[in-house]
Amino acid sequence: DAKTTQPPSMDCAEGRAANLPCNHSTISGNEYVYWYRQIHSQGPQYIIHGLKNNETNEMASLIITEDRKSSTLILPHATLRDTAVYYCIVRERSNDYKLSFGAGTTVTVRA
Amino acid sequence: NAGVTQTPKFRILKIGQSMTLQCTQDMNHNYMYWYRQDPGMGLKLIYYSVGAGITDKGEVPNGYNVSRSTTEDFPLRLELAAPSQTSVYFCASSYSGDVSYEQYFGPGTRLTVT
């Protein structure tokens, strides 16, 4: 899988938008960008994924730059329950089924 | 839908004991996976299955066995438990193995081997 780079931690105020950056400068044309999060002591939770276009679902928005070398996950109205480790993962088309979680970004939402 | 469920939530085993971790999904997903997560580390794939009756090894299969007799269930068997198997075990499922399909995870089983 292509390597991703995320900041180790960030704080966010409750009710404000949280913008989580991810660099994936070696991404190739058929690799997807995935975001998962892991709330303390729970299983990883799927958030969103995309290939080229920006994506939005009930949880978040994913903005992918035109050159695909970076992306931003946006949590529009962060709540205390959004405090978690957020993982940006690039998945390539292959027979490798595993999800490779890096260190992620620890997001702390403060009241 | 309950999604992916796992039992038990916690377990303490003595060295040399055996146990089965249960995993069930109700999303009619063909693909199922077992991962382990050691403290402060990422997930490692133990075994996976692409459908009933078909299983294959992941990155760290030694000391484990799996079976897939139904679409819904994918139990993980630990034989002769060792302290190195102390970990959190997550089961996951997906509709397809293609990278365009997301994997959904269960809540995990926390296993301690002493």
Image (cartoon, rainbow, N blue to C red):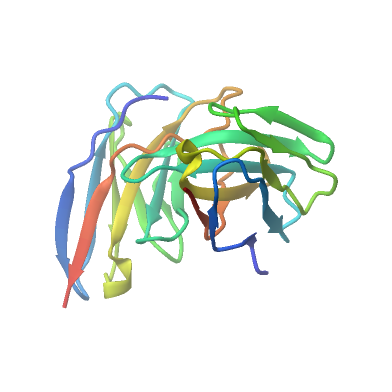
Q: How many discs appear?
A: 0
Can you give x and y, in whole percent of width and height, for residue B28 in the image? Answer: 76, 54
The answer to whether residue B38 is visible is: yes
Q: Is B107 on the left or on the right of A65, as rendered?
A: right
Instruction: Answer whether residue B98 is visible to the viewer in this image.
Output: no
Q: Quadrant of residue A108?
A: bottom left
Q: Residue A106, percent across and down?
A: 23, 53
Say which quarter of the image contains residue A95.
top right
Name the residue at the bottom extreme.
A111
State whether residue B42 is above or below residue A86.
Answer: above
Query: Residue at 68% of width from left, 40% of height from top?
Result: B96
Left or right: where B53 falls relative to B32: right
Horizontal arrangement in the rendering, residue B20 relative to residue A108 (left or right)? right
Decide which of A55, A96 is in the foreground and name it. Answer: A96
Report the front residue among B66 and A74.
B66
Considering the image in quadrants, where does the N terminus of chain A appear? top left
Query: Which of A56/A88 is in front?
Result: A88
Residue at (17, 51) in percent of width and height: A9
Q: Residue at x 58, y 34 (%)?
A: B46
User: With A24 as the anchor, is B38 left or right in this view?
Assistant: right
Say which residue appears at 31% left-offset and 34% top-offset.
A66
Q: Where residue A89 sits in the image (x, y, percent)? A: 39, 38
Figure check: B51 above or below A96: below
Q: Is residue A93 above or below residue B14?
A: above
